[in-house]
Amino acid sequence: MSQSLVEVDGLSLAVGGPSGHHIVRNVSFHVQPGEIVGIVGESGSGKTMVARSLMRLQPPAIVVSAGDIRFEGRSVLTMTGKALRAVRGARLGMVFQEPMTSLNPSMTIGRQLEEPLKLQARLDAAARRAHILDILRRVGIRDPEGALVAFPHQFSGGMRQRIMLASAMLLKPSLLIADEPTTALDALVQREVLELMLDMVRSEKTALLMISHDLPMVARYCDRIIVMRQGEVVEQGPVAEIISRPGHDYTRELLQSMPVRGPLRSVDPAAKPVMEVRGLEVEYRAKAGLLAPKTMKKALHGIDLAVRPGEIVALVGASGSGKTTLGRAIAGLVDASAGRIFFAGEEVKPDSQAWRHYRLNCQMIFQDPFGSLDPRMKIREIVGEALRHDQQASRAEKEQRVRGILEEVGLDERYLNRYPHELSGGQRQRVAIARAVVGRPQFVIADEAVSALDVTVRAKVLQLLADLQRRYGFSCLFISHDLGVVEQLADRVVVMRDGAIVEQGNRDAVFDTPQSDYTRALLSAIPTLTRTETGVSLAWRFANSGEAGASEAPAKALQ
C-alpha cells in the first residue's frame, strides 16, 4: 500500500474543551490517492464533524481532544494559519451540503469563483476569466458568460451545486470532500451532479471523501464505505463486502431500512374517484427583468388526475415539474386559473358549502414539519386545532381523540405539553401526520413528507403512514422525488415534467416497463434492491439495456 493521502488516527472531538461532551470518539481511517471513500450514518453520527475537521472547519466550540489528522504526511492540527490557508482550496477542496448558504448572496458568481484563484494561483485577470469559463462549461452551465454576472438566487438547486463543485475543483485539489452534496436534489439531478463530480475527480486523479446517509448512492460510486454511529466508526471496508455481508448490527439496520417493493395492492379501477381534477391549470405572474413588463408563466398545463378510494397515488418528477404546485392547487392553497375539482363525484368551487366540506376532508402533510407547526403552540393544541370545526364532538371527546391519535403515531402523553422545538425531526413529522388524520379525512396530500428524515426514521414514518392509511382507509396523493420510497408505498404512479403529465399507470408497469424516455431516465438513477440472507443486493435499472435514457454508469458487482 502506498502512503495514504489522508490518515485520521484516533480522532476525538469534544464540545467546550477536552473534558467536555464527546461527539466523536476514536475515529480512524485513511484515504488513498485517487480513491473514492464514503462515510455513511444518520444525523448526529458525527460524519460531518469528522469531514470538517480535516480542514479544521469545525465550529470554534468543538475541539480535538485526542488523535491526529495527517494530510500528505503532515499534521493538519499543528499547521500554522499561513500553512493551513495554503492547503485549503489548493490541496483540500470541499462541497458543502447547502449551496445557497455556502455561496455569498451579495456577490456575483464570477467574483466568488475568482477569489480563490487570486489567493492561490499566479494568473492574470484574463487567464483567471478563461479558467473560470472553462470550469463552468465542464460542470454543465449553459451560459457561463452570463453566470459570471449572475447571483446565486438566480440558479436552481442543481445549478448552485454545480457552481459549488466548480469552485472546489478550480485549483485541482488532491482531495475533494463532498458533504451531502445531493440531499435536496431530485433523482435525475442527483445522478447528473454525482456523475459529473466523479468524472471530474477521476480526470484530475483527485481523491473523493463523500459524506452521505444515502447507502445506495454511496454503494454505486464509492470504493470503500465507513459506517458511523453516535460518533464512532462501527464498520468499514470494501463496498461489495459491506453491502452483501455487513458485520455490524447497525449496518444491517441501515440496509433493512432501505425501501423495498412489496406486492401490488388491488384497487377497483371502476370505483368512483374520491378526488378528481379536470383540465387544471395554474399561472404565475413573472417579471422578465427589472424594467420588463409582467408576464404570465404557466406552471400546470391542463392536468387530468383522479384518486380512487383507498388508493395511494404517487406524483413524481424532477424539481420544477409542478408536483408541489399541483398538490397545493388541489388542496386550495394555490388558486387555479382554469379547470375543475371534484370531490366524491360533486364539483367543488371556492366559497361554496361543498368547498368547505371538501377542505375538511382534504388534509395536507408538508415537507418541513418544523415550518408547518406553530412554534408557540403545544402539541395537544396543534393536533387539536384540526378538530375545531367538529360541532358534534365535545371538548372531552376531542381531547381523547388527540391523545388517541398521538399514541397511534408513537407519541405518548408526555409529548402533549411539549413545543415543536422540543421534538426531533421524526417526532415533528409524526405530529404533522397526526394533525392531518385526526379529523378522519377521506383524502390526504403528503408533500415530500419523508425527504428530510434519516434512513431508519424514514422507514418508521413510512410504515406508520401505511398503517394509518390501511386503518382509516383514506386516499393519498404522495408527492416525492425519492423513487425508492414511491416504489415501496404507491399503488399508482404519475410522472410529471414541465407542468404536464408524461406517463401514469400502476406502480409495477411504470417501474418495470416505462413508456417515456424521461421516466426511464428518472428510474435509472435508483437501484432495484433485493434482500439476501446476509445483506442486500443492488442492481441498476436499465444499466445494460442500451435503450434511450438507460444509465451509462457501470453497475457495481454487489451480488
Image (cartoon, rainbow, N blue to C red):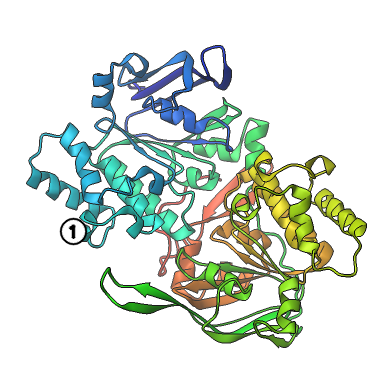
Disc 1 packing (10 Å; few <14; some 14–19; many ≥20): some
Give coordinates of residue 40: x percent, y percent: 53, 37
On the image, which quarter does residue 534 sit in? top right
Left or right: residue 441 compared with residue 54: right
Residue assigned mark 1: 145
Q: For the point 48% across and 43% down, which residue is it? A: 218
Q: Return the residue nearer the eye: 289 or 146.
A: 289
Q: For the point 27% across and 48% down, which residue is it? A: 107
Q: Amino acid at mark 1?
A: Glu
Left or right: residue 95 compared with residue 502: left
Q: Return the residue nearer the eye: 345 or 26.
A: 345
Can residue 268 be seen here? The reply is yes
Q: Is residue 376 above or below residue 436?
A: above
Q: For the point 18% across and 52% down, which residue is it? A: 133
Left or right: residue 203 compared with residue 347: left
Give coordinates of residue 291: x percent, y percent: 25, 72
Give coordinates of residue 517: x percent, y percent: 44, 72
Q: For the point 65% across and 53% down, which residue is it? A: 373
On the image, which quarter does residue 1 sit in? top left
On the image, which quarter does residue 494 sit in? bottom right
Q: Return the residue nearer the eye: 184 or 372.
A: 372
Q: Return the residue nearer the eye: 174 or 307.
A: 307
